[in-house]
Structure formats: structure tokens, C-alpha cells
Image (tube, rainbow, N blue to C red):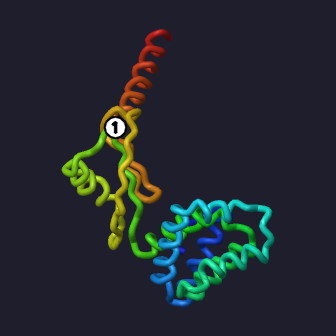
């Protein structure tokens, strides 16, 4: 496994990954899972189906076969969707699909990278951060999939998360560190 997963959704995603690897079908299953996840996110009907805890098992399976049966999905993908229906776990599909996508990205050496700044970074700022921070945190053969996030609480600077590694170069953190040193100095002066 190129990435550790936890929770029920992680177990399903890991099982799907192992099965796809053994069948040498990772690319097709990954593509199908991403497409289904995108469609599910846009479908209130599917979300209602996924959340319906009172639907009979047979009806859930029949619904999955009706919706996906003629879609030329790989056998692994179709069987996986059927298992989710049998287990009554379709409500977890968005989380399973996200976990599976993360595993596939790790499988391909693509590492999710989150850059948090106080305001919208310019392209030159992002290039600088990528070159001087992100690239130094990657292993050989890895590439970063960069996402950005705005958090005004950090005041300035940035926080960079590359996979499970974190570098906090925010002004907010620096202010907290300075306050701590000053308070320690004051307490020593009082003693």
C-alpha cells in the first residue's frame, strides 16, 4: 500500500486498490471511480439513495445494477459498487472514492500538497514556495499536486503540508513563539 488508510472507508478503498493492482486494472478503476465520484457529487437523487437506510438490500443491489449495469465499467468497479450496495455502505462512497484517489496518487508518486497563506498568493509566490520549500520535501520521483487555502489567522507567511510533512513559516506562529519567549523572560525577571 503506497498510503496508510484508516476507518471503514479506508478499508474499502484499500481493498479496491489491492484488487485493482492484482488485476492490473488500476488506471481503469481509478478513472471510473473518479468519474463516478464527480457524478455522485452532482446528483441529489444518488445522495438520497446513499442515505436511505430503510431500503432493502435487494432493492439497493437492483438500483446499482440499473444505474451502472450498462455503463461498461470494469468488472472490479462494478463488483465493488455491488458490494457497497450489499453492505449498505453507499453513504461512504464519497469518502471511499477520495481515499482511493489519494492511494492512486501516491501509487503514481503524486503527493497532495497544501499551501496555506493569509491571502491569495501570486503565481510568482507559488513558484517560489514550490521551488524552495515543496521540492525539498519531495522524495525522488514524486511530484506535488498543489492546492492552496486562505487562512487570515496566519497573518502572513505560509504553512506548507506535503503528504504527512508540515513546515509552518507563518507570521502567526512566529508571533506566538516571540510571545512565549517574552513571557518566559518576564517570569524569570519576577523570580
- Residue 159 visible in this rendered orientation of the protein: no
Tell me: residue 155, above or below residue 21.
above
For the N terminus, the quadrant is bottom right
x 22%, y 47%: residue = 122
Q: Nearer the viewer, residue 84 or 8?
A: 84
Q: Nearer the viewer, residue 188 or 147?
A: 147
Query: Residue 142: image x %, image y %?
Result: 35, 69
x 45%, y 21%: residue = 184
Crowdedness of circle 1 by 10 Å Cα count: few (<14), some, many (20+)?
some
SS of the residue under disc 1: loop
Q: Which image quadrant is residue 116 in?
A: top left
Which residue is labeled 1 in the image?
A: 118
Query: Residue 128: image x %, image y %?
Result: 22, 51
Q: Is residue 182 left or right of residue 99?
A: left
Query: Residue 84: image x %, image y %?
Result: 68, 73
Q: Which image quadrant is residue 27 in?
A: bottom left
- Residue 133 visible in this rendered orientation of the protein: yes
The residue positioned farthest toward the bottom in the image shown: 23
Tell me: residue 2, above or below residue 131.
below
Q: Nearer the viewer, residue 93 or 146?
A: 93
Q: Nearer the viewer, residue 151 or 183?
A: 151
x 60%, y 73%: residue = 14
Amino acid at each position: 500500500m503506497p498510503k496508510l488508510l484508516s476507518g471503514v472507508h479506508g478499508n474499502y478503498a484499500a481493498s479496491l486498490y489491492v484488487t485493482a493492482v492484482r488485476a492490473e486494472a488500476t488506471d481503469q478503476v481509478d478513472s471510473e471511480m473518479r468519474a463516478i465520484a464527480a457524478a455522485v457529487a452532482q446528483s441529489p437523487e444518488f445522495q438520497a439513495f446513499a442515505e436511505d437506510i430503510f431500503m432493502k438490500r435487494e432493492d439497493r443491489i437492483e438500483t446499482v445494477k440499473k444505474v451502472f449495469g450498462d455503463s461498461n465499467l470494469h468488472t472490479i468497479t462494478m463488483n465493488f459498487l455491488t458490494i457497497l450496495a450489499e453492505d449498505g455502505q453507499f453513504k461512504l462512497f464519497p469518502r471511499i472514492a477520495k481515499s482511493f484517489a489519494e492511494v492512486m496518487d501516491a501509487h503514481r508518486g503524486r503527493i497532495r500538497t497544501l499551501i496555506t497563506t493569509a491571502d491569495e498568493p501570486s503565481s510568482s509566490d507559488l513558484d517560489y514556495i514550490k521551488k524552495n520549500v515543496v521540492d525539498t520535501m519531495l522524495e525522488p520521483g514524486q511530484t506535488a499536486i498543489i492546492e492552496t487555502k486562505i487562512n487570515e489567522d496566519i497573518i502572513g507567511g505560509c504553512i506548507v503540508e506535503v503528504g504527512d510533512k508540515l513546515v509552518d513559516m507563518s507570521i502567526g506562529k512566529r508571533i506566538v513563539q516571540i510571545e512565549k519567549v517574552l513571557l518566559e523572560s518576564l517570569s524569570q525577571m519576577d523570580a
